[in-house]
Image (cartoon, rainbow, N blue to C red):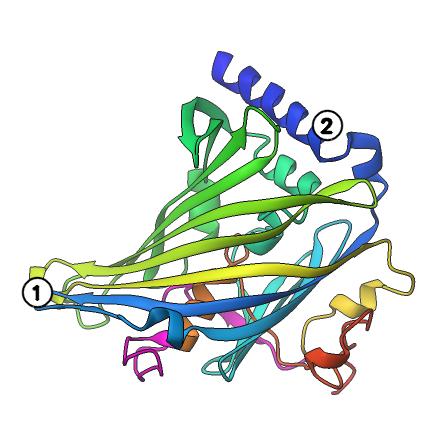
Amino acid sequence: MQETSSAQYILQQYLAASGGQKLLSSVRNSYAMGKVRMVATECETAGRVVRNRMAARCAEPGRFVLWQMAPEMWYIELAVGGSKVHAGCNGKLVWRHTPWLGAHSAKGPVRPLRRSLQGLDPLTTASMFAGARCIGERKVNGDDCFILKLCADPETLRARSEGLAEIIRHVLFGYFSQKSGLLVHLEDSHLTRIQSTTGGDAVYWETTINSFIEDYRPVEGIMIAHSGRSAVTLFRFGEVAMSHTKTRMEEAWSIEEVAFNVPGLSMDCFIPPTDIKSGSISETVELPQSGKSKAGGLLPCHGAKVAALEKADDNVGRKRRAKGGFGSLKFQMPPVNREG
């Protein structure tokens, strides 16, 4: 009980530091555009570890655009190193489009995009941690922080599991600065078990993402993080010790533009693509399983980085492009899908 009440107090302080409940609640929609740099830094198998010694030189630049609208609607486009990923939610259905699988829905309840929790949407972040517990304190980059822990309940895990893929665990940690009250570090771990179709041993996938959230600045009175970095580890293991692989990717991002209550943004901008597959695909299975990257041959580069980093608090996907590319995306509405 004490852990829960402490968490509620921390979240109240977070909302106050972010601009206040009244101002945050007045936001009907929002827009953000930013730059990213991604690189695969390490690939480990049972036999060897390959480190990318030219990571800084091999980092691939990209851009993203994120639109959000209350309640629970969002749409993102991300382009990195020749790969484009789109994702969205119309308030009822989360879907994604990847170049290797096309458009498909994400099973389970509606949930926010992880990128929006990285200092771009304080109200959604506070709502996400509403059921969390305060488990202690820790320093993050010299800053004393309270730690809030949130675990997905068994019912949610079952709803997001399908077929041979069973989601066993999803845990989220938020580190809130005692000095500023703001969220400065986000960590989550996601474990999936995939049964063999031939009756063999199951394979496990664990995705761990650590994000450091920095450079908070006020935008129309709301504190928004304008830069940060994430490290993603994809760990595949099974009953056989020689079968494990581990890939590590890193991302740095910066925000160039943010706006609130953009005129003309409507629900039509969040309509899912017409060619979406009715069945969902496991968030782990959707990673491409072959192909080398330009970053020293580390696998699987473009797809794994994009898919892991754009999960809605696990999600990615969409087929449509904004007209004119990212260079002309300033205050341009997301495209409305009207093709049959």
Q: What type is the residue that disc 2 sits on?
A: Ala
Residue 245 lies within the magenta run: no
- Residue 285 in view here: no
- Label drawn at residue 16: 2
Asked if 150 appears above or below 118 in the picture, the reply is above
Q: Secondary structure at mark 1?
A: helix
Nearer-the-camera pick, 175 or 208: 175
Query: Is the residue under label 1 in contact with that under label 2 (CB below 8 Å)?
Result: no
The residue drawn where x is 54% and y is 17% is 6
Q: Main secondary structure of the magenta part?
A: loop
Figure check: 268 above or below 2: below
Question: At which x and y percent is residue 270?
Answer: 74, 66
Q: Point out the stretch of residues depicted in magenta.
A: 274-301
- Could you tell me how far apart the alpha carbons at marks 2 and 1 are, in whole angstroms? 51 Å
- Horizontal side, residue 30 vs residue 52: left or right: right
The residue under label 1 is 242
Q: Residue furthest right?
A: 263
Closer to viewer: mark 2 or mark 1:
2
Quick check: 95 above or below 29?
A: below
Instruction: Tell me if residue 291 is in the magenta stretch.
Output: yes
Residue 31 percent coordinates (x, y): 76, 60
Q: Position of residue 301 (x, y in %)?
A: 37, 75
Q: Quadrant of residue 330?
A: bottom right
Q: Which residue is at a point 52% across and 74% down the rendered structure image?
A: 61
